[in-house]
Image: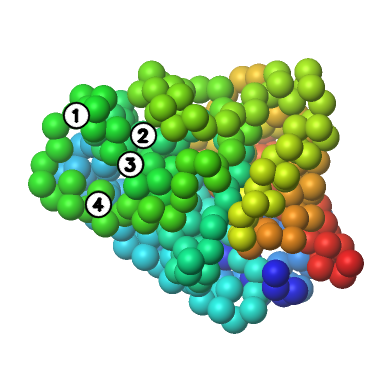
Amino acid sequence: MSKQLQFIFNPSELGAGTRGASLGPEAVRCAAREQQSTLFADHPVLTLAHRNDLLDRPTPYAYAKRIDGVLQVFETVKNHVKETIDSGKFPLIIAGDHGSAGGTMAGLKLAFPGKRLGVLWIDAHADIHSPYTTPSGNIHGMPIATALGIDQSDLQKNNLDLTTMQYWNQLKSHSLKPTDLIYIGVRDVEQEEIHAMQQLNLRNYTVKELRERGLNLCLQEIKEKLSNCDIVYVSFDVDSMDPSETSYGTGTPVPNGLSFAEANEILCQMSQMKQLACLEMVEINPCLDNEKNKMAEQTFTLLDSVVKSLKESWNN
């Protein structure tokens, strides 16, 4: 893969149910400055346009809130991911909410046409709802469904208007196959998501399994499976970590998550994969942080480790 880094700050929070994730990328930059790090001076930083102005008014789309703006964000992310890769750089994304990760996967498909995409989704949530099944209407719970191109219409509980259906169909990229998706840390799911995970035979390495079987053994299995793919995308939601150890500075914290050390080891080992084409960190929300800017500080420490691991891999 490429030998140059390109940081992409995506401040969109249209898909979240709480406000403040748009401040996450800059909060991470503030954490870097507090540590007197030159990481963001040493590598280019691209800040994407967003449509957070739509948060200032009601949305007519109850089961896919602000989907009109999310579609624009998807297009922006998709195009910039492709342009970054086409320019020979590695996209390292820090985003607001996790919903726009669907645009990241669409961008990888566009940048590598005909290539097989593998995804490691590190998250407390499966993010596999659709507008037909969502209990909240928040699109940050749907990016995996957009990449897989699924509706779960057999479990439909929401009656959608025609415009929502049209927008939803435009979001679906069909960039990912179920066999090439692996979860780590998922532990907060609704019944419709459990059904989808079982129906599609999706693999979830729980925190309990990682500890009982050993983190290194599980990571070896994950890397072996993803090595069958041409390119790999790692998507890291900070709510995968245990808030009692890290911070509550994220939109939907869930107890009994990964330790900071486990998250660091996972990200560093995955950064060594030769197929790695993109890595993303999401859902840092300083407005919800009960310990000042701790979540952003933790994220920056992880980010710094990832960059060192990437460079080590590229130099070998």
Q: Is residue 283 left or right of residue 3?
A: left
Mark 3 or 4 closer to N-term? 3
Q: The C terminus appears in which quarter of the rendering? A: bottom right
Q: Amino acid at mark 4?
A: Asn
Q: Which residue is mark 2?
A: 129
- Label 1 and label 3: CA atoms lie apart by 15 Å
The residue tagged with tag 4: helix, strand or loop?
A: helix
Is residue 240 placed above or below 43 in the rendered structure? above
Q: Which mark is residue 43?
A: none
Q: Amino acid at mark 2?
A: His
Q: Which residue is mark 1?
A: 158
Is residue 31 placed above or below 139 in the rendered structure? below
Q: Which residue is mark 4?
A: 169
The residue tagged with tag 2: helix, strand or loop?
A: loop
Q: Is residue 19 left or right of residue 247?
A: left
Q: The N terminus appears in which quarter of the rendering? A: bottom right
Labels 3 & 4 near each other (Cβ < 8 A): no
Which callout, 1 or 3, points to the residue nearer the camera? 3
Residue 85 x/y as whole percent: 58, 73
Q: Which residue is mark 3?
A: 150
- Label 3 and label 2: CA atoms lie apart by 9 Å
Residue 221 x/y as whole percent: 73, 37
Which callout, 1 or 4, points to the residue nearer the camera? 4
Mark 3 or 2 closer to N-term? 2
Mark 4 or 2 closer to N-term? 2
Query: Viewer-proximal residue, 218 or 281?
Result: 218
Residue 52 x/y as whole percent: 36, 55
Query: Viewer-proximal residue, 8 or 85?
Result: 85
At horizontal 75% and vertical 55% (from top left) the residue drawn is 273
Mark 1 or 3 closer to N-term? 3
